[in-house]
Amino acid sequence: MFELSQLRCFTTLASELNFHRAAERLHMTQPPLSRQIQLLEHQLGVTLFTRSTRSVALTAAGKAFFIEAQALLDQAHRAAQSARLAASGENGALTISFVASAVYDFLPRALVESRRGRPGVDITLLEMNTFEQLQALRARRVDMAIVRAPLQQPGLVSECLLREPFVLAAPAEHPLVHAAAPQLEQLHGQPFILYAHGAWQPFNELITGLFRSSGIQPEYVQTLGSTLAIVSLVNAGMGLALVPRSASAIRFEQVRFRELPMPPGVRSELHLVWRDDNDNPALAAVRDAVRQSAEATYQAC
């Protein structure tokens, strides 16, 4: 119906009410400005200005159109600015999936770092197990995933974020809580709560492999799919557990955490995964913030 350049001509003339000054502000001469105003009036089918040899004034239609024209120009400016910010990664939206144990300590810190560096990026969080995250990445439902084991799949990039040791979670009155220097061998024959193989295969195989290689045979009383559930059973006095050190942020009245000497390589890992063809401009900025948070807080990979 009309162009933004015509609106700029109109609003400038409406502000100045003088063709000479308006033309100077627009860096043009008066004849082209007059033609733009006439063309706009023709397209609208109304008279916007009354003109005489001495003055220019807005008509009632012109006054009404002036308000809307300013709003349209402001909206166009915001739209252009929004597009530029989105293209640079300053604004936009990003979806991050994560394993539940990442939320105890690492993920909140990473989010603070991300929002400090990119406050205009709207981050959506989705809690999923590793298999669900793999499916979500393939379907492009998430931009970035935080998992406990690398996802070695075509089209995915997987990098280790951090490693942390396992610690012993024990009921508050258990003798190992009060031992001067508890040892791994003291778990032999003890009631033990293990990560379920189906839900946490990396942890299940790592811990059971550790016990086999050390000649330790605990009494497995329960296998569960989440760290929170495991620690809650420890709180109920049902047994001991080995959990990532970040789980010590979970506060239960009857649970205590103790360091145990562990063989090299027995570590809990978090991995960052994304599609190699993800073109979301916000991805790189948020990914860097997550990396920086890992490097500043933990033993980075």
Image (spheres, rainbow, N blue to C red):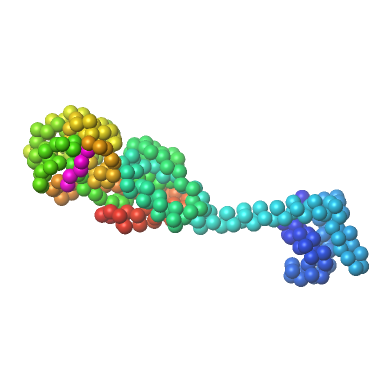
Residue displayed at 74% across by 69% down? 25
Residue 6 in the magenta stretch? The answer is no
Residue 19 image point, x, y percent: 82, 67
x 43%, y 46%: residue = 143
Picture quadrant of residue 216 = top left
Res. 4 in view: yes
Q: Is residue 183 left or right of residue 300?
A: left
Compare residues 151 and 80 and report the one nearer the observer: 80
Pick the front one: 46 or 1:
46
**Left or right of 159 on screen, residue 111:** right
Q: Position of residue 39 (x, y in %)?
A: 83, 57
Q: Which residues are magenta?
A: 255-259
The percent coordinates of residue 125 (x first, y second) are 42, 42
Nearest the viewer among 34 and 63 is 63
Identify the residue at image location x=14%, y=46%.
Answer: 260
User: In this orientation, which residue lies closer to the viewer: 182 or 77?
Assistant: 182
Give the left or right position of residue 234, taking residue 126 as reference: left
Q: Quadrant of the C terminus?
A: bottom left
Assign the magenta stretch its main secondary structure.
Answer: strand
| Figure disc tally | 0
Above or below for 173 versus 268: above
